[in-house]
Image (cartoon, grey):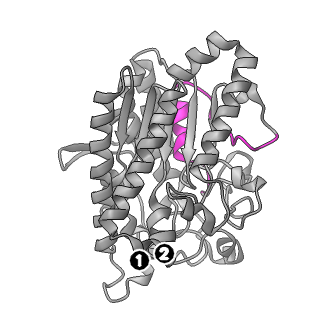
Amino acid sequence: MLHSKVIMKKHRNLTLPCLPHTFCILLHLFFLVAKGSAKVPAIVVFGDSSVDAGNNNFIPTIARSNFEPYGRDFDGGKATGRFCNGKIPTDFISEAFGLKKYVPAYLDPKYNISDFAIGVSFASAATGYDNATSDVLSVIPLWKQLEYYKGYQNKLSAYLGETKANETIAEALHLMSLGTNDFLENYYTIPGRAERYTPQQYETFLAAIAENFIKNLYGLGARKISLGGLPPMGCLPLERTTNVMGGNDCVARYNTISLEFNEKLKNLTTRLNQELPGIKLVFSNPYYIMLHIVKNPDLYGFESASVACCATGMFEMGYACSRGSMFSCSDASKYVFWDSFHPTERTNSIVASYVVEHVFTQFLK
């Protein structure tokens, strides 16, 4: 088990930090902020369950996690609707920028514009770029998240005044994290898209939606935008559990899809930076850091990467995770994944630290 020592390892021309404890990771994030005064007044979030802070609690869907054992390591041990035992990446990112410890859900009535002026999440678990993906479990589609954002801007103008609100929007970091559900929940599961598109054609279809969304954000005044890539989808415990013929290893074809789609998003980022004056669009790629953790869990102090903490750790998430909670692990920090689809708080902190250091440093200057 690693303690205070920090291991730095090279992987595909990337320096991957091996930070064993959440406390050390937070110190690392605060050090980055201390190096310069942060110029990001707010965090604005769009996406799926990777960044949903609880919006799905307030819509009629089964894609929820506002019950035990979710949130058992969150402040107060409360299930907030985050698909995790604790904090999600955007919470750590907000903290890294010297803002609040948590980014609240826009639909949560406990919060108002004074909270949202510093950070807000419009994300909805089980959604995707494709409207057909959000239809599967009746969650908030990406276009609706954009409509909420327009309403938020109006509230922000009333709260701060139009000039200050426009400045806040221009300087705020807009984060996009979605796409996994388009493939695993929709394309490879529900008849329809696979009959119309090859996997590569579907990637192009989704990338076009991402481009249109970014252009819409830009048209509404956003200038600092992070386009999130896909993790190694084939290494999620749910996919490994069903890969019996492959010895329960990562599913190679899903990882290939992640790599292909990420390349399209990376190229899109390069092109839009050339086309849209004043935009600072970055591509945040979680693929290699997540793969490194999954393939080398011991280097990060983890004991399990193939199965999750919640229930049997093989296929449960959401309500199934709750029903099987008696079988859950006692210490989630030893696991890479919390449920069969989502990382633990500790994994989230490592990934957030990596993205802040390697991608977001330009926004900290």
Towards the viewer: 154 or 365: 154
Q: Quadrant of the C terminus?
A: top left
Q: In the image, what residue occupies the spot 70% across and 50% down?
A: 55
- Choose top left, top right, bottom left or bottom right for residue 276: top left
For label 2, count other residues whose C-alpha is less than 10 Å away and answer few (under 14), some (14-19) or many (20+).
Answer: few
Can residue 137 be seen?
yes
Towards the viewer: 70 or 75: 70
Question: Which residue in the structure is indicated by mark 1?
Answer: 195
Look at the image and say whether residue 105 sits in the magenta stretch: yes
Q: In the image, what residue occupies the spot 54% across and 77% down?
A: 315
Magenta stretch, overall SS = loop
Secondary structure type for disc 2: loop
Question: In the rendered structure, which segment of residues is drawn in magenta?
Answer: 84-109
On screen, 107 above or below 337? Answer: above
Work out which residue is located at the far left of the displayed protein and give it.
13
The type of residue carrying mark 2 is: Gly
State how far apart marks 1 and 2 are (Cα).
5 Å
Question: Which residue in the structure is indicated by mark 2?
Answer: 192
Where residue 262 appears, x then y in whole percent? 32, 52
Where residue 320 appears, x then y in whole percent? 66, 75
Check if mark 1's residue and mark 2's residue have beta carbons within 8 Å: yes
Q: In the image, what residue occupies the spot 32% across and 56% down?
A: 261
Left or right position of 114 against 182: right
Look at the image and say whether residue 32 sits in the magenta stretch: no
